[in-house]
Image (cartoon, helix red, strand yellow):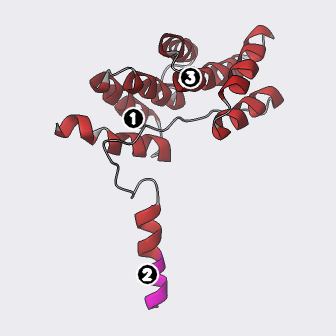
Amino acid sequence: MRALFAAAVVAAVFSSAGQAQSCDDQPEFAAHRTANGVVRAQYNAVSRGEWPEAIHFGEEILESGGAPGHKVAAHTNLCAAYAATGELEAALSACDRALEMRDGAWRALNNRGVALWLSGQREAAVEAFRAADMSSSGEDEVEANLALSQCVTAG
């Protein structure tokens, strides 16, 4: 019983929601995938931090004239990839396009917050993280970013 309790404590400490955030940490992107094979490939590229590949797959999806849900995912993932490569205006534009297509898309809101954070617009980023939280179900990335946002609200 004691070992089970210890394991539960360790799990809580190392979970992304339970882990303390340092103000030097970077916010977390939220990758979006669908049943579409190219979207899945883009999702995998985002998850692995393979930004040029994520951009390539995203552009391919958008040029193909795919389904609206696939385009939302592509724009959301492009937002992450552009933000990670420092193309912050392109990132914000991609997230905005995703949100135009699906108001309240939590991954797009989260990634928009990351792009704002990286551009130095911390308070706007916190607003985006809060909006993502309102649209999500306690997703790990959003929870981690909300914890990081305490650096802004505490300071």
In the picture, the disc for residue 65 is none
Q: Earlier in the sequence, mark 1 or mark 2?
A: 2
The residue beneath circle 2 is: 6
Residue at x 73%, y 12% (from the top left corner): 62
Query: Magenta segment, principal secondary structure?
Result: helix
Horizontal arrangement in the rendering, residue 150 relative to residue 29 (left or right): left
Q: Earlier in the sequence, mark 2 or mark 3?
A: 2
Q: Is residue 33 visible?
A: no
Q: What is the spatial separation of the Cα atoms under label 1 and label 3, in whole angstroms?
A: 28 Å
Horizontal arrangement in the rendering, residue 40 relative to residue 119 (left or right): right
Amino acid type indicated by mark 2: Ala
For the C terminus, give its image quadrant. top left
The residue range painted magenta reads 1-7
Q: Secondary structure at mark 2?
A: helix
Q: Quadrant of residue 9?
A: bottom left
The residue beneath circle 1 is: 134
Q: What is the spatial separation of the Cα atoms under label 2 and label 3, in whole angstroms?
A: 40 Å
The residue beneath circle 3 is: 85
Where is residue 134 drawn, in percent x and y? 39, 35
For residue 3: magenta?
yes
Q: CB atoms at circles 1 and 3 under 8 Å apart? A: no
Q: Secondary structure at mark 3?
A: loop
Q: CB atoms at circles 2 and 3 under 8 Å apart? A: no
